[in-house]
Amino acid sequence: MSVILTALGKQQVLSLLVNKTTGYGLTLHLFKNDYTPVESSVTADFTEATFSGYASKTLTNSSWTITSSSPYYAYYANQTWTFTGNPVTYQTVYGYYIKQGTTNYTIVAERFTTAISLYYYNETLTIGPKIYIK
């Protein structure tokens, strides 16, 4: 599994470092298309999940934790979705992406090592989003 900081994401990180932009309003999304993120990925490359019980999640700015030694990264508490459909409407999820709200830029994306299929009522999917700077 490899977290990709997109080209637009790198630009946004630099903007934050110089306090150019405030109030980013990051949102966490799951994607259901069989896609491997690359540095040039944009929001249109991802097909957002639509399973019963799914909704994107707002990531509160103050809830991120930043590491104080190398490798440097920011991480967020685990986020969980619960499948409320039935096996006939199952969905496979391939990874997640994080969008910056005011621009709709995808700044980070990660494809799971193994796709996750949600089949059963009350089955859950939990991830802890991270942003690495390389």
Image: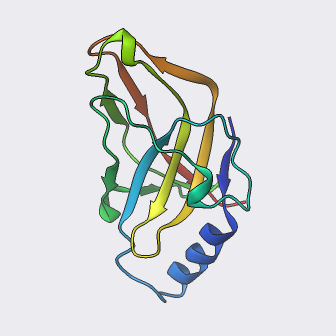
Left or right: 132, with 60 as reference point: right
* Residue beneath the point at 41% across and 50% down: 28
Left or right: 131, with 3 as reference point: left
Relative vertical location of residue 2 with respect to residue 98 in this rendering, above or below? above
* Residue beneath the point at 36% across and 30% down: 51
On the image, the x and y values in percent for residue 120 come to 34, 10
Total labels drawn: 0
Please say which color scheme the image uses. rainbow
* Residue beneath the point at 47% across and 60% down: 99
Q: Out of 9 and 14, give the one closest to the viewer.
A: 9
Quarter of the picture containing the C terminus is bottom right
* Residue beneath the point at 49% across and 18% down: 117
Quarter of the picture containing the N terminus is top right
Relative vertical location of residue 109 with respect to residue 21 in this rendering, above or below? above
Residue 79 lies in what quarter of the image? Answer: top left
On the image, the x and y values in percent for residue 47 come to 53, 45
Residue 101 lies in what quarter of the image? Answer: bottom left
On the image, the x and y values in percent for residue 52 come to 29, 28
Relative vertical location of residue 23 with respect to residue 21 in this rendering, above or below? above
Instruction: State the residue lying farthest toward the front.
Output: 88
